């Protein structure tokens, strides 16, 4: 079975240091098979605000949330020539493949529960589960902290039900339900993603 990397690139990376987005995408492109799941970044925060003000209802809010991810997808794509846009049914890895998933064009809002609990972290675990009948998947969440902290201490690995914060709550449920582990690592620090891709390890936390 071929190995693919399912990599969620959080808006948190851009929030901390916009220049690093390109760096993270360059580091990810060292993998021959990779699909990037975009976070929602400020686009999602803004949609949440609009939802609070206008009380749009779950259906509209959920669509805006998924659309937010697609906006961040365009930001990511704008930094790198290495990746192609892909809908879920266009992901092909037989002879390599580097994609950024387009969640709105893929109509993911029809497939996932309509709730703000469901964010890009959940989409990431959900996609990994869809792909794993055909590929061996390694799932990574790239964010702006070194991993998961418990009582102020960075932990090497942790069961999903013990995690508080960093990953959205529904994604933690999906990690248990599907038995998929997610490695949380810091994209703000240059080289972390690269060592994960090239050497298979780096500083971070495995959530299982
Ligand atoms: N126990 C914890 N361990 C580590 N980080 C935590 C913890 N609890 C909360 N966090 C926070 O989670 C943040 C990362 O999640 P956040 O949702 O902000 O970003 P993201 O998921 O990378 O991006 P996006 O907003 O696009 O989803 C970190 O900046 C950190 O402050
Ligand atoms: Mg998040």
Image (cartoon, helix red, strand yellow):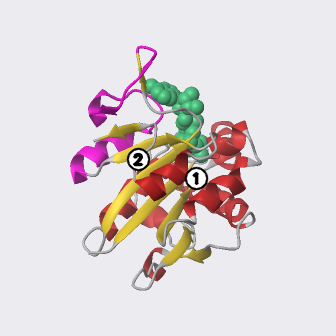
In the current view of this chain or complex, which residue is farthest to the front? 199
Which residue position holds label 1? 65
**Is residue 12 one of those drawn in magenta?**
no
The x and y percentages for residue 73 are: 64, 62
Left or right for 176, reference 69: left
In this view of the protein, can residue 198 be seen by the observer? yes
Q: Residue at x 46, y 37 (%)?
A: 203
Left or right for 1, reference 18: left
Which range is magenta? 151-179
User: Which quadrant is home to the N terminus?
Assistant: bottom left
Tell me how many marks there are.
Answer: 2
Residue 201 tag number? 2
**Is residue 169 one of those drawn in magenta?**
yes
10 Å crowding of disc 1: few (<14), some (14-19), many (20+): many
Q: Earlier in the sequence, mark 1 or mark 2?
A: 1
10 Å crowding of disc 2: few (<14), some (14-19), many (20+): few
């Amino acid at each position: 079975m071929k190995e693919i990397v399912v990599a969620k690139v959080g808006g948190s990376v851009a929030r901390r240091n916009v220049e690093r987005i390109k760096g993270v995408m360059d580091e990810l492109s060292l993998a021959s098979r990779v699909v990037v799941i975009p976070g929602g970044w400020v686009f999602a925060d803004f949609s949440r605000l609009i939802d609070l003000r206008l009380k749009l209802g779950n259906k509209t809010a959920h669509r805006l949330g998924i659309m937010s991810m697609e906006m961040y997808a365009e930001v990511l794509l704008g930094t790198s020539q290495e990746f192609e846009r892909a809908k879920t049914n266009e992901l092909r890895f037989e002879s390599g493949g580097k994609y950024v998933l387009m969640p709105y064009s893929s109509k993911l809002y029809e497939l996932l529960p309509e709730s703000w609990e469901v964010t890009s972290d959940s989409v990431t675990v959900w996609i990994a589960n869809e792909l794993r009948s055909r590929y061996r998947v390694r799932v990574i969440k790239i964010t702006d902290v070194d991993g998961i902290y418990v009582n102020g201490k960075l932990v090497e690995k942790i069961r999903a039900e013990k995690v508080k914060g960093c990953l959205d709550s529904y994604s933690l449920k999906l990690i248990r339900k599907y038995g998929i582990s997610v490695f949380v690592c810091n994209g703000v620090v240059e080289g972390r993603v690269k060592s994960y891709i090239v050497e298979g390890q780096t500083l971070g936390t495995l959530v299982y």
